Image (tube, rainbow, N blue to C red):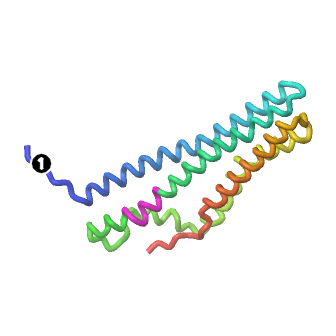
Amino acid sequence: MPRREVTNAELLLVEYQHLKDEQKNRVTFRDNLVYATLASMAAVVAATLSSKNHTDLLLLLPPVSVLLGWTYLVNDEKISAIGTYIREDLAPRLGHLTGEEEPVFRWELTHRSDQRRRTRKLLQLIVDVSTFCGPPLAAVAISLTYGSRETVLVAASIIEIVAVGVLAAQIISYADLRGPAVVK
C-alpha cells in the first residue's frame, strides 16, 4: 500500500481541530465550575444555618471560592489563549500555505467584532468578581461580626480576605476589555 504524504495544511487543520476540541472541553468545564461554586456556597450556608452558634463555619466559604475561582480563571485564560493562537499564529500560517487572500477561520475574528463586546466583557467581569469574590467576603464579614473572636479565626479571616483580594485582582487583570476586533 503506497504511503500518502501529509501536507502542512492538513497538519494545521488537524491541529486546529484538536485545539477547538480542547477549547470546547475547557468551556464546558469552566462553565460547570460556576454551578459547583454555587452548590458549594449553598452547602456551607446550609451547614451554618443548621448548626446554632457556628457562624464561624462561614469561614469555609472563602477557601472553596478561591480554589474554584482560580480554576475557573485558569481555564478561561487557556480558552482565550487557544483563540489567540488560532487567530494570530495558526490561521495566518494556513492562509499562507493555501494562498488564501481572505483570513482562514474567519469566525475566530468575526465573533470578536461585535460592537457591544466591551460592554459584554465588562458585565462578565462584574459577574465573575461577584460570583467568586463577593460571597466569600460577605461570609468573612458575617463571621467577624457574629462569630467568635478567637485569634486563630481572626487570623484565618485576614488570610482569607487577602486570598480573595488576590483572586479578584487576577480576575480583573485577565479580563479582556478591549473593544471589538477589526475584521479585515
Describe the element under mark 1 as helix, strand or loop. loop
Tell me if residue 124 can be seen. no
Q: Main secondary structure of the magenta part?
A: helix
Residue in the image at 32% along x and 66% along y: 93
Relative image position of residue 113 (x, y in whole percent): 53, 68
Q: Nearer the viewer, residue 28 or 133?
A: 133
Q: Residue furthest top?
A: 51
Specify whether residue 85 is painted magenta.
yes
Q: Nearer the viewer, residue 169 or 35?
A: 169
**Position above or below: 117 against 1:** below
| Image quadrant assignment for residue 122 | bottom right
Q: Quadrant of the N terminus?
A: top left
Relative image position of residue 2 (x, y in whole percent): 8, 47
Please state if 131 lies on the left or on the right of 87 as rendered.
right
Specify whether residue 37 is painted magenta.
no
Relative image position of residue 181 (x, y in whole percent): 52, 70
Please state if 152 lies on the left or on the right of 37 as rendered.
right
Residue in the image at 36% along x and 51% along y: 17
Relative image position of residue 76 (x, y in whole percent): 56, 52
Tell me if residue 162 can be seen. yes
Query: Which segment did they paint magenta?
Result: 82-90
Please state if 124 lies on the left or on the right of 137 as rendered.
left
**Position above or below: 82 against 147:** below
**Residue that badge 1 annotates:** 3
Q: Residue furthest front?
A: 151
Residue in the image at 32% along x and 74% along y: 101
